[in-house]
Image (tube, helix red, strand yellow):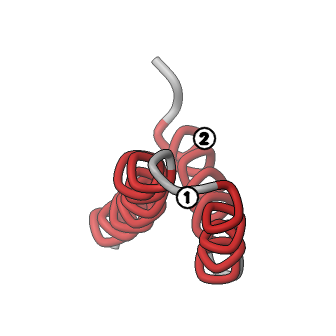
Amino acid sequence: MENSFVLLVLFLAALATGGLLVNWIGLGRAMSRLSVSVYVEFHQHTNRTFGPYMPIMVVGALARGVFLAVMYGIH
């Protein structure tokens, strides 16, 4: 049971990290080459896409990580 919980925590943390890295590395580089008006429109669309699930993923991964640290102790 504990191993499956640790695996779930790592999976959710990986999803959150992947979402942030896609936005930072992939989209950031592409958006830096756009005109100002296209950049703003593109950024608004990505916020609508990432907005609903990223707070859940990041806060969830952080809370579960803290829970694991408490569960296993910090050495």
Q: Residue furthest top?
A: 75
Residue found 50% across the figure and 45% down from its top: 32
Q: Is residue 11 above or below residue 51?
A: above
In this rendering, the label closer to the viewer, 1 or 2: 1
Residue 31 coordinates in the image, percent (x, y) = 50, 54
Q: Is residue 41 above or below residue 65?
A: below
Q: Is residue 41 above or below residue 63?
A: below
Instruction: Give the camera-side residue of 45 and 60.
Output: 45
Question: For residue 57, which quarter of the picture?
Answer: bottom right
**How many numbered marks have been drawn onto this rendered protein structure?**
2
CA neighbours of label 2 inside 10 A, class few (<14), some (14 to 19), many (20+): few
Question: For residue 61, which quarter of the picture?
Answer: bottom right
The amino acid on which the numbered mark 2 sits, given as a three-letter code, is: Val
Horizontally, residue 8 falls left or right of residue 31, namely left
CA neighbours of label 1 inside 10 A, class few (<14), some (14 to 19), many (20+): many
The secondary element bearing badge 1 is classed as helix
Residue under circle 2?
70
Residue found 60% across the figure and 41% down from its top: 70
Q: Is residue 4 above or below residue 14?
A: below
Residue under circle 1?
61
Q: Which mark is residue 28?
A: none
User: CA separation, marks 1 and 2?
Assistant: 14 Å
Horizontally, residue 64 falls left or right of residue 2, namely right
Instruction: Give the camera-side residue of 9 and 59.
Output: 59
Residue 2 coordinates in the image, percent (x, y) = 36, 64
Residue found 46% across the figure and 40% down from its top: 72
